[in-house]
Image (tube, rainbow, N blue to C red):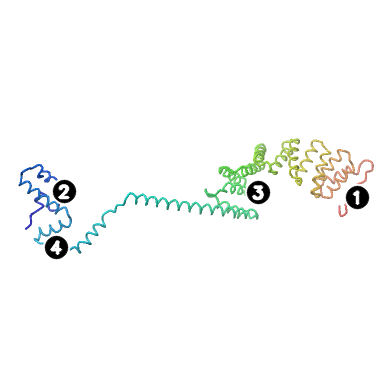
């Protein structure tokens, strides 16, 4: 019968590894040769305690010892049978990695995350740009509903044309859908995207049109001026200023300045010649009225109002022939006021004869 290592260490047969270790440390401290010099008995006990600890602290040896202690016999541990146990034991141990492996692993994860983020970024950006350009094509081909849908699909944080998309959506809402609140909402969102000066100028112009439409004339006028400050060549904004000076604020001389700039920049701007003629008529500059109308008539002959304004200026200059000829031309184009003047002014005084109507005229 082998020695009872459990009794030697003073522990129970169900003691765990921690209890075995604790008991050994206590006895080893008491029996250590350094503390018991020249004490053979203590030295022998110390060796016995050490042997007991080595056996019971080793899982395989402890298992063999327990069988031998209980049954007096334990089968020898074969090397081949011990391998699976040892390998399994090793597999259960947490694997440790070097500091370099940890750094490389972390770096690899960071690279993967960055690649995924960049791929997502470029995919979203490409999709946004694709929808924007498709919307632009539909807008240019006057497929406005489809264009609005495409622009809406392009509104991602990575779309560099986001402000332009809101501008064109606002234009569709204003000019096609007549939805002024929604148009103003898109304008506000476009400004929030820090747009370029060109887009800002068009946003001011569009908001000015909305204010003009709703009767907020001073605000509209100021917005048109801001639009021109950013885009000096935006003729539509300058024309709006001239029109408001002419027909809302009665500032005819200021309107003349706007119209004159327009005609200097673009000699084919018929409406600007008409605005000039109207303002000169109000300012009683009758020769300039006729000059402006003649410039306009060189572009278009079929506008009754142009002939009528020319007739009024000629009448004020007492040029009866020119006045009646112009009244006749306006009358032939269906302008009722010209017909009335034709028979009240041109048939009175000195037996003046009406000019013969043009071939095919009424």
**Residue topped by disc 2:** 21
Q: Point out residue 180 in the picture as x, y percentages from the top left corner.
A: 62, 45
Residue lying furthest right in this view? Answer: 351
Q: Point out residue 251 in the picture as x, y percentages from the top left corner.
A: 74, 35
Foreground label between 4 and 2: 4
Label 1 to label 2, Cα distance in Å? Answer: 134 Å
**What crowding class fits label 4: few (fewer than 14 Cα within 10 Å), some (14-19), or many (20 or more)?**
few
Foreground label between 1 and 2: 2
Foreground label between 4 and 1: 4
**What crowding class fits label 2: few (fewer than 14 Cα within 10 Å), some (14-19), or many (20 or more)?**
some
**Residue topped by disc 3:** 175
Tell me if 195 is positioned left or right of 15 in this view. right
* Residue 349 appears in the figure: yes
Discs 4, 1 touching: Cβ within 8 Å = no
Placement of the N terminus among the 4 image quadrants: bottom left
**Residue topped by disc 1:** 356
Helix, strand, or loop for circle 2? helix
Q: Residue at x 7, y 57 (%)?
A: 2
Foreground label between 4 and 3: 4
């Amino acid at each position: 019968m082998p020695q009872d290592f459990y009794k030697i260490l003073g522990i129970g047969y169900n003691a765990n590894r921690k209890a075995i270790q604790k008991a050994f440390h206590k006895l080893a401290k008491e029996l250590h040769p350094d503390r018991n010099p020249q004490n053979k008995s203590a030295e022998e006990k110390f060796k016995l305690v050490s042997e007991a600890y080595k056996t019971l602290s080793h899982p395989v040896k402890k298992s063999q010892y327990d069988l031998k202690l209980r049954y007096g016999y334990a089968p020898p541990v074969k090397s081949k049978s011990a391998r699976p146990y040892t390998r399994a034991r090793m597999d259960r141990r947490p694997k440790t990695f070097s500091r370099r492996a940890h750094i490389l692993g972390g770096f690899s994860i960071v690279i993967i995350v960055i690649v995924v983020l960049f791929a997502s970024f470029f995919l979203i950006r490409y999709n946004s740009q694709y929808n924007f350009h498709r919307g632009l094509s539909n807008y240019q081909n006057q497929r406005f509903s489809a264009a609005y849908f495409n622009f809406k699909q392009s509104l991602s944080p990575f779309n560099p044309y986001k402000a332009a998309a809101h501008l064109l959506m606002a234009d569709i809402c204003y000019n096609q859908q007549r939805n002024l609140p929604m148009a103003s909402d898109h304008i506000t969102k476009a400004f929030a995207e820090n747009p370029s000066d060109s887009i800002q100028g068009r946003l001011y112009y569009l908001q000015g049109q909305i204010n003009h439409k709703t009767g907020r004339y001073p605000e509209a006028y100021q917005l048109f001026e801001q639009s021109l400050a950013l885009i000096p060549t935006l003729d539509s904004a300058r024309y709006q200023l001239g029109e408001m000076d002419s027909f809302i604020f009665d500032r005819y001389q200021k309107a003349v300045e706007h119209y004159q700039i327009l005609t200097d920049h673009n000699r084919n701007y018929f409406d600007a010649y008409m605005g000039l003629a109207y303002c000169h008529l109000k300012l009683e500059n009758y020769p300039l009225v006729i000059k402006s109308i003649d410039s306009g008539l060189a572009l278009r002959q079929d506008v009754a109002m142009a002939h009528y304004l020319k007739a009024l200026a000629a009448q004020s200059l007492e040029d009866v022939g020119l006045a009646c000829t112009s009244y006749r031309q306006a009358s032939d184009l269906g302008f009722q006021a010209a017909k009335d003047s034709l028979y009240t002014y041109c048939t009175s005084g000195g037996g003046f004869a009406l000019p013969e109507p043009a071939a095919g005229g009424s």
